Amino acid sequence: MISNLAQSALTLVRAVSDIPAQQPIKAPPADFYAIAPEIILCATGLLILFMIAVKRFKSTIVYASVAIAGALASLGAGVFLWFDLSGDRYRYSFGGMIAADRFSAFLIVLTAVALVMALLLSVGYLQRESLNKAEYYILMLFCAAGIQLMVSANNLIMVFLGLELLSICLYVLVAFDRDRPTAQEAGMKYLLLGAYSSAIFAFGIALTYGGTGTMNIPAIAQYFSSNLLANQGVVLLGLAFMVIGLAFKMAAVPFHMWTPDVYEGAPSPVVGFMASGAKVAAFAALFRVVLIAFEAYRLDWQPLLWGIAVLTMLVGSIMALVQTNMKRMLAYSSIANAGFILIGVIAANPKGVQGALFYLVAYTFMVLGSFAVVGLAAKRGERGSELKDYRNFYQDEPILALILTFFLFAMAGIPGTSGFMAKFLVFSGAAASNQWVLIVIGTVASVVALYIYVRLVVNMYMLDSVDLIDKPGGNVRVNFGSGLALGIAVALTLFFGIYPEPLMNIANHAGIIF
Amino acid sequence: MKGSFPLLSLLLFMPVIGAVVIGFVPRARQNVAQILGVVFSGITFALAIWLVIGFKTGVPGLQWTESVKWIPSFGISYRLGVDGISVFMVVLTAFMFPLAIIGSGSSIHRAKHLIIFKLWLEAALIGVFISADLFLFFVFWEMMLVPMYFIIGRWGRERRVYAAVKFILYTAFGSAFLLAALIAVAFISGHGGTPTFAFADHLKTSFTLTQQRWLFWGFMISFMVKAPVVPFHTWLPDVHAQAPTAGSGFLAGVLLKLGTYGMLRFCLPLFPRAAVEAVPILLTLGVIGIIYGAFVALGQRDVKRLIAYTSISHIGFIVLGIFAITTTGIVGGVAQMVNHGLITSALFFLIGMFGDRRHTYDLNEWGGLKKNMPIFAGIFLLVTFAAAGLPGLNSFVGEVLTLFGTFAVHRWWAVVGAVGIVLGAIYLFYVYGKLFWGPLDNPKNKVLKDLSPRELVVIVPFVVAILFLDLYPAPMLERITPSAEFVVDRVEKGTKGTKQEYVEPKVTSPLKNPALQKAGPKHDGNAKTGTSPGGQQPAPGGPAGPAGPATTGPGGSPAVPGAPAPGVVTPAVPAPNPAPAPGGGG
């Protein structure tokens, strides 16, 4: 023991003394292109912070414009990264902390698009709710940066850092309307449960590190492939804890309890963003953990995820049936959607990955669009979001009603929308792995989910009007930003439904690393 | 094959273009929307007529095919084509929509939206029938739900919401299994490589027995819900009763046929072994449907529910014909699909005309209408006769062929099924008597006027079609027969040398003398073509048989009705009026 120590100390001394003479110090490569999108977002956030310090503008439109410009620049950087990677499969940089691959570039771009749309929707919303604070935009930018870090993380510690960055921003954003009790409740609930789940995730990392001696995701895979573990309890527990931590973030059953409360209380644009962004981040990390790090343990995690997916689809769809609040109902439908995306992970083949990535894109636009309509239709203080308030919504707001109907049918998986293609692709992925039971459960769950949307459509078109004070609509003002965001969401949902081939190819390229 | 001209695409997109154009019509100009709706659906019908005239007789397989790559990485293409079965479904669809658009008038609430939904539904229905790609088929299959859901839910009767939700959920439940099954078919046909959704590739694939069983029932659940076959029928009466007139018309006329069409198109040719195994179950369900539908119909007070139950009974006949797996039975089944579509939607339109006047469908509210609405009563009587399968009207052809086709192989099911015809006559004439005879003592009914010109425009084409298809069914049957033979042939080949081996009995036609038949050549699927186009050749199979009167006269119809036609095993050489045939031949 002691001799060993002395030996290594000697080597160290030799090494230190040798280096200056023989070769330059090799610092780990720092590939700034790989984290340019995150840097841009953080810089923009800091810029706005600086602007506030200098002079606070009454109108937040300035901050919003800067934030949107930053998000667009981040989007551009993401696209650049995608094309920059055309030669390599992946590049690890920052000492293996960051993986610059097409998978991360794809999800970085998706996050940036979601951020742009959420920001466009926020301007009008914040004005209506008198929440015109520049901090909102800063938090959104940092939150998106956290998501982007998490999707490009190549080390479990980076995953955790990204997770924490996005979570902490979201805790604040959820409770941003702090005068509203439901928002406070939502923020508190999300904070407490989120902190708990982060702890579990961190514990999972620690156990994995204990079992494998590394937190680098490819290194873990290499460790498993080159070593035969006599006792696998530690790593399996680590895997399970990490899956639980991520399942919390993606709102998978049975770790979904917070979702309806938080979605109900949080500002609608934030809900749209967290429902898409946080899911993207959690799924990205799940992909890297189970499909790269724990690839060798496929037979262990597949049944675990199988159970979670089935529960998520069924509970999400069935619980949505009994909701009376629009946002709670959409929350359960977003839970159900997480279950469908999980099918693609369980399939664990290129088609499944492709399907899950396609689903994430389709889902992002559907969920942002539907929450956008709900946010627009509600009155100040988010009143008028009950299901009964949507009676004869079509009479009052025909265009918004049509758009909402379109998104609902898209989520129900009616052909001609990206929602159908997404479901079809994840089912195809499962078919390629012969997961037939999962497919049948999935298709049946989507019928149950269909009832949710149909019920709402009934409310909007087919019932006689009742006089309600908090009826939405009447004179909903759709400003330019919201209109643009809705237009993008509708156009892309339709386009990817009718001509999915380009997006499928891109998703296929993005999934090539697994 | 006339592949050059994209007639099918034109058929598919004409209603879509119409719907988009009508979308721009201002809300105040409902009548413009209606005229445009009639024009676009009228053009669609004209194209459908062109399609059926240009359709080559005596050839199985798809015609007018088109193919454009859509999602190559999944083997999905925009493939279109029609065979002898689907071509008539297309014509039936295209026939019904202009009339339905005329029929609902421009005065009703939000007529413009109704017309848009109707055109959307028409496009989706035509799409289902002309798809030669399983994925495309499913896309149209699901696309159809939305307009139908809105038509029922927004323009229906009091409990329309319940009916609309019931409709969409039942059908979507069936589709869930369809989706899973079709993905499985595509992956199995891809043999581990790129999956393929081309129907032609599926036909080349041989599925193992286990796969066949699962997939057969996966498809069948969906089709049985849609048809509806008896344990899955409970949605139909509610939906029919609550839907608006046009909605019921579409439902009875075309939507229900999707189920039986799917059985013929997918279940039998792709999974022959499983199908042969399932025959007893499905025949039993068909017969139960016939009898049950008829009895329950007798107990209804709401006329629309009553007709809905008669639909269940008639669908039972079609299922019987299809799963007898004889050429005669299938030809009869397809003919019955067309006939039932025409008759039942005509009945719904007629009842709707009464409903428009009185806003009730209660059977007891009627009575004695013969006196002040003679034209209405006359047309109603004709359609009732047709529905009852009276010789001389179109339904008779289908029912007789179905029963003969079934009798040849599954005697007792046919016997029980035949009872359904009697029951059908009972309930239909009971209804007719209740509606039109008796004293005209209801004061509300005394003031009713006879049919308006607009209503006549709607209903007369139905009457003409009903009469035409009876008096001259040959063009229809000779186009259906090759496709029906193809299906039977597929089953025979697919089950050859297995435990489920199935060979179609030689004697299947009501028009033949069995004694002469024995000397005829062993028939096989390729040589069975009954009537050659234009009647220029003698019937195949005939030359080798013993001498008999040459039956193929000009125009493809036999010169001597009811005479024995040796060697010709299909019924595709019917008399201009086959009514005397059973008497003469049997």
Image: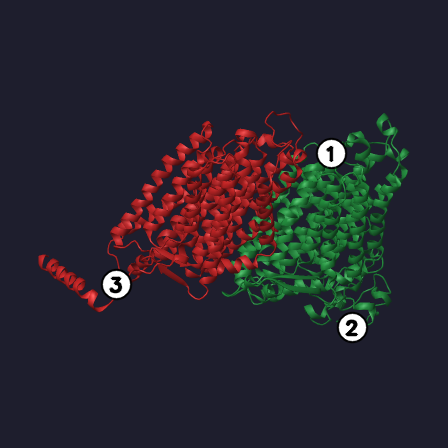
Chain colours: A red, B green
**Observer-nearest of B187 and B446:** B187
* Mark in the foreground, 3 or 2: 3
User: What residue would you read off at disc 1?
Assistant: B302
For marks 1 and 2, give the CA distance.
56 Å
Task: Please say if the residues under marks 1 and 3 sit with CB atoms less than 8 Å apart.
Answer: no
Residue plotted at (36% across, 43% down): A164
Measured as percent of width and height from the top left, residue B406 is found at 69, 55
The chain that hosts pointer 1 is: B
The chain that hosts pointer 3 is: A
Measured as percent of width and height from the top left, residue A325 is found at 53, 32
Residue A188 higher or lower than B173, as above or below: above
Q: Quadrant of the N terminus of chain B?
A: bottom right
**Observer-nearest of B224 and A242:** A242
User: What residue would you read off at disc 2?
Assistant: B546
Residue plotted at (57% across, 51% down): A418
* Quadrant hosting residue B148: top right
Classify mark 1: helix, strand or loop.
loop
Classify mark 2: helix, strand or loop.
loop
Classify mark 3: helix, strand or loop.
loop
Which amino acid lies under the numbered mark 1 shown in the image of this protein?
Answer: Asp
For marks 1 and 3, give the CA distance.
91 Å
**Observer-nearest of A151 and B420:** A151
Horizontal side, residue B276 vs residue B461: left or right: left
User: What residue would you read off at disc 3?
Assistant: A25
For marks 3 and 2, give the CA distance.
102 Å
Mark 3 nearby-residue class (10 Å; few <14, some 14–19, many ≥20)? few
Mark 2 nearby-residue class (10 Å; few <14, some 14–19, many ≥20)? some
Measured as percent of width and height from the top left, residue B36 is found at 80, 48
* Mark in the foreground, 1 or 3: 3
Taking the view exactly as shown, the residue that stands out farthest to the front is: A54
Q: Quadrant of the C terminus of chain B?
A: bottom right
Which amino acid lies under the numbered mark 2 shown in the image of this protein?
Answer: Pro
